[in-house]
Image (tube, grey):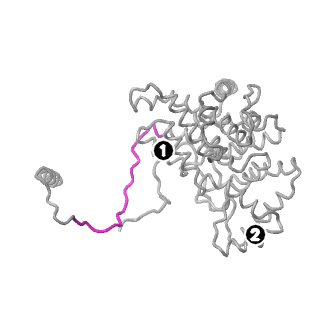
Amino acid sequence: MSDIKKGLAGVVADETAISKVNPETNSLLYRGYPVQELAATQSFEAVAYLLWNGELPTETELAAFRATERAHRALTPALKEAIDALPLDAHPMDEVRTAVSVIGAIETAGSGNVLDAVGTPEQNLERSLKLFAALPAIVSYGQRRRRGLEAVESRDDLDYAANFLWLTFGEEAAPVVVDAFNRSMILYAEHSFNASTFTARVITSTLSDLYSAVVGAIGALKGPLHGGANEAVMHIFDEIGSADQVVGWLDAALAEKRKIMGFGHRVYKRGDSRVPTMKAALDTLVAHYDRPDVAELYDTLESEFVSRKGIYPNLDYPSGPAYNLIGYDTLTFTPLFIAARITGWTAHILEQQASNALIRPLSAYSGVDERHIDGYVADAATVEALEREEEAAG
């Protein structure tokens, strides 16, 4: 019997230079830098540059990077038309997935064959940056149109995080809000071989194009056991209502053996290292919006759950209420995850392309034994082919 690793738990599928969790410090590292240090000191643009290029940018390099990003922020007419063709009640993840597919179809149009669409490393780095620049307009317009609002034009005088909030709400966000949002984007940018990243690498390994890999990654991220968990956290908060209802709600939830989203992580055994940074950002938003009730509910549920189960929060737990306070609809939370993780996904796509091997694991068969159709007689050509195969096998 084969030693089966359900969910590929513990399987080392390949190597990567992009990120790792340092078991000694329990820190998530991007290209060697602890993510909490990056979130405290860098813009999201600088972190995107780091993930793609291996080093933080110089001032000159960052200026050039920002100029290119700002040149590709606009929601093009073709893209807006494609989004508008979707039902208003379509899930925002389907909306973003469709938008990326449309971008890919336009960008690779005219390719002579599928191999032509794969592109060179330079082309794919450019494609990565263009997707990074376009996603804020896509995600923001999705929320606005569901609220019956028109799209807002991007502003070249705002950095990535500030412009993202401008596109969504049509007004300049306070610095404390921009900072919290910027930190969340950095914290969500990359996390090694998670389900969506591995999906992107599998698709890339077949020599498919970058856009197909990103679309596949979005499909994986949609699942509530992965990216959809931040949505689920907010649904839990809404269901509980207030801190004084936590104990009764948790009693019932545990009795029903419900999975409490926002807690636990396969990689971290001593708590998600990203949580303290995001919790600190949430605290600044609680103070800014004068919402101590949110902090009270958050702290009470965390304390009760950890004391009973010994399982600690993951990044989705503080990010859900943070995005809610900023003003994002719950359904928009996972598209925000896409806007952040596009950097990590594309970094892995580039890495996979640079040293590719088709990812094709084996499986252990557990079905019925070999059996045959009554009365079947193989034709002469089939018999001859089978005999050749047996001879070749020795």
Give coordinates of residue 252: x percent, y percent. 71, 74
Q: Earlier in the sequence, mark 2 or mark 1?
A: 1
Q: Residues within 10 Å of mark 2 (few under 14, many from 20)?
A: some
Q: Secondary structure at mark 1?
A: helix
Residue 35 is one of the magenta-drawn residues: no
Mark 2 and mark 1: span between their CA atoms? Answer: 39 Å
User: Dividing the picture into quarters, in which one does residue 138 lie?
Assistant: top right
Name the residue located 78 percent from the left edge and 39 percent from the top edge: 178
How far from the left and from the top, in percent, is residue 154?
72, 29
Instruction: Judge left or right: residue 11 versus residue 129.
Output: left
Residue 176 at what x, y percent from top left? Answer: 83, 42
Q: Nearer the viewer, residue 212 or 47?
A: 212
Are dots 2 and 1 in contact, CB under 8 Å?
Answer: no
In this view, 210 is above or below 327: above
Relative vertical location of residue 381 with respect to residue 2 in this rendering, above or below = above
Residue position marked by numbered label 1 in the rendering: 201
Q: Quadrant of the N terminus?
A: bottom left
Give the residues in magenta: 352-372
Q: Main secondary structure of the magenta part?
A: loop
Q: Is residue 206 found left or right of 342 in the rendered image?
A: left
The amino acid marked with disc number 1 is Arg
Amino acid type, residue under disc 2 in the picture = Glu
Q: Secondary structure at mark 2?
A: helix
Disc on res. 304: 2
Q: Could you tell me which residue is drawn at 58 percent across and 50 percent down?
A: 222
Q: Quadrant of residue 205?
A: top left
Q: Is 17 or 68 nearer to us in this picture?
A: 68
Quadrant of the snapshot with the C terminus: bottom left
